[in-house]
Image: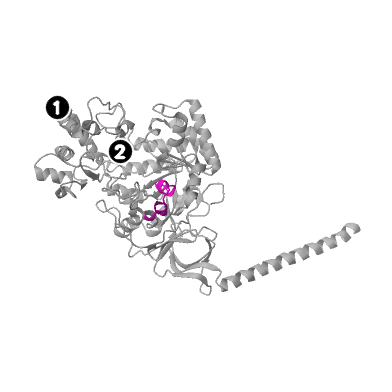
Amino acid sequence: MITKTINAVPILKLAVNNYRRIFSIILIWISFSFGLAAQGSYDLIIRNGRIIDGTGNPWFQSDIGIMNGKIVAIKNLKNQKAKRDIDARGLYVTPGFIDLHSHADRAMTSDFIEPRMAKSLTSQGLTTVLGGADGRNTIWPLTKEMEALNSKGHGMNFILMVGHSTIRREVMGDDYERLATQDEIERMKGLLKEGLEIGAFGMGAGLEYRPARFSNTEELIALGKVISDYNGFYIAHQRNEAIMPLSQLPSTAKGWQVDGLQALEETIQIARATGIRVVGSHHKSRGRSAFGRSSHDIQVINNARDEGLQVFIDVYPYETFGGGARPMIPKWSLVDKNISIVGGRDDPKWREEGLFKNSRNNLKRNWSDSEKREIIKRDISWIVDHNGGQDRVVVVDYPDEALVGKTLQQIANDRNTTYQEVVVYMALNGYEEVIGGAWTRGYGINDMDVTNYYKQNYTITSSDAAVSGVKDREGFQSAPGAHPRHFGAFTRRIARYVKDLNTTTLPFAIRSMTGLPASVVGLKDRGYLKEGFAADITIIDFNNIRDNATVLNPDLYSKGIEYVIINGNFTVDRGELTGNLPGVIIRSNHENF
């Protein structure tokens, strides 16, 4: 006992001395840190802002200190200095906006610097976008996609995802118009696992498009179980959003077609079978015949969530869908009579060069046949209904400028004819190089449905937008009838649905763009304004925020976004675009780089 007591003395002294040393080091570090702060250790201080932190809570006034691309202080920094100050008095300081349905990946992996800047998107307050939209990776495998991103830099953060269509095509090649075999599903699971190991956060799908539309729910559930092993999530352009899928017309549809509600129920079934988080992406009640379906959708989702399923949707704030203008006439009526139409509207053969070279003569021949004329009229009626109806389809470009800006119904009234005959007239007398002769855009979504969706606390704001408005760069230029979302989706969510309609509060809307998508994805240090989080910050002038892009003028920048900061670097500074490329690749299990 005595020996043990004696031996304990030096051990005690050693412990005390170690504690003293540690305490001294801590004191020195604290003193050093405060000394640095006094000398201007912060790279940036945002002062006096109204902080909306991404949780949905009301704003509070505070300062934010940023150092080395991180938020290091959210408190009163009145006596602290920085290399730069921003006086945000009267402005709202929010987390940078996150877009879960973006087509920016093609621009940010391109060979050109200007598209990589993604100005049409960063100008809306965006700081982070999700890859693999609609289940398609721009470049495969993911290692090469990362190489392309890093080769020249990119204007926003990029979240890695595996595209379902990408891996399905890798496994099945061109022989995809069928159900996958068990062996093929196993190979898809292997590719998915490889992507998740690299750092993908989950899998995106585009079930209304080739090749994914030939899959079944069992295939998706099998892949979803792999996602579950990595705590990932699933996001899908669902199998349909209307009463009939995009690929079909009344003249081509065979058997029962999956409708929008059934497509939503499939997404819920995947959640039920796998336990993973699921998102119905750019969710909508598409087409005049589907107007009002939001109430049913909401009830179905609420029931699923009451069941304990992690079901979410993302919605963009417009009444029009589709990236560009589209024809209102069935393509089959413009081609040679020997062309088969059984492959649907998305059959690759419709892209064959020279297929429409005799379109006017073919249309005249088909229209003169009384039996075919009725089929053409029925198909036109469906296409127009799907795009919102004859009083909601607008001509955006046509040789006779007197028709531009008018609806099909207005033109029909002026000419004392039917809207179906107007569509045929424009195809026969319009631009020869344009299928259907005219650029038209429909308002195929009802604002009532958009409003209903946005009131739900599981609804995320998205854009479905690509980089646009880049002059002299084919594929990134604006075009007649381009969707205004490329320039205005996130600002419109605030301007119209908070300011104009008072659909939700501003903190609720900001949460739908920041904290909610970050939580669904599983981002560890973005989506909220918190100490230790990445300095992805958007500062808005609520009084002046407004989207300016329209269908007729789609490439107009928004106003009211005063600053956008990504990893501590400005992409918008005092309302001006900087052209900086501060984005990083965000991986689920790695450091960002």
- The answer to whether residue 179 is left or right of residue 9 is left
**Circle 2 is placed at which residue position?**
242
**Circle 1 is placed at which residue position?**
369
Is tag 2's residue or tag 1's residue first in the polypeptide sequence? 2
Circle 2: residue type: Ala
The answer to whether residue 509 is magenta is no
- The answer to whether residue 225 is left or right of residue 179 is right
In-front residue for pair 155/269: 155
Name the spot of residue 476 as percent of width and height, x first: 35, 49
Residue 208, quarter of the rendered image: top left
The answer to whether residue 104 is magenta is yes
- The answer to whether residue 34 is left or right of residue 441 is right
218 is higher (above) or lower (below) than 324:
above
Which portion, as a residue range, is magenta? 100-119
Q: What element carries label 2?
A: loop
- The answer to whether residue 25 is left or right of residue 381 is right
Name the spot of residue 119 as percent of width and height, x first: 38, 56
Q: Quadrant of the N terminus?
A: bottom right
Residue depicted at 28% across the width and 29% down the height? 253
Residue 430, quarter of the rendered image: top left
In-front residue for pair 155/523: 155
Circle 1: residue type: Asp
Q: Nearer the viewer, mark 2 or mark 1?
A: 1
Q: Is mark 1 on a helix, strand or loop?
A: loop
In-front residue for pair 55/413: 413
At label 1, counting other C-alpha atoms closer than 10 Å, the crowd grade (few under 14, some 14-19, many 20 or more) is few
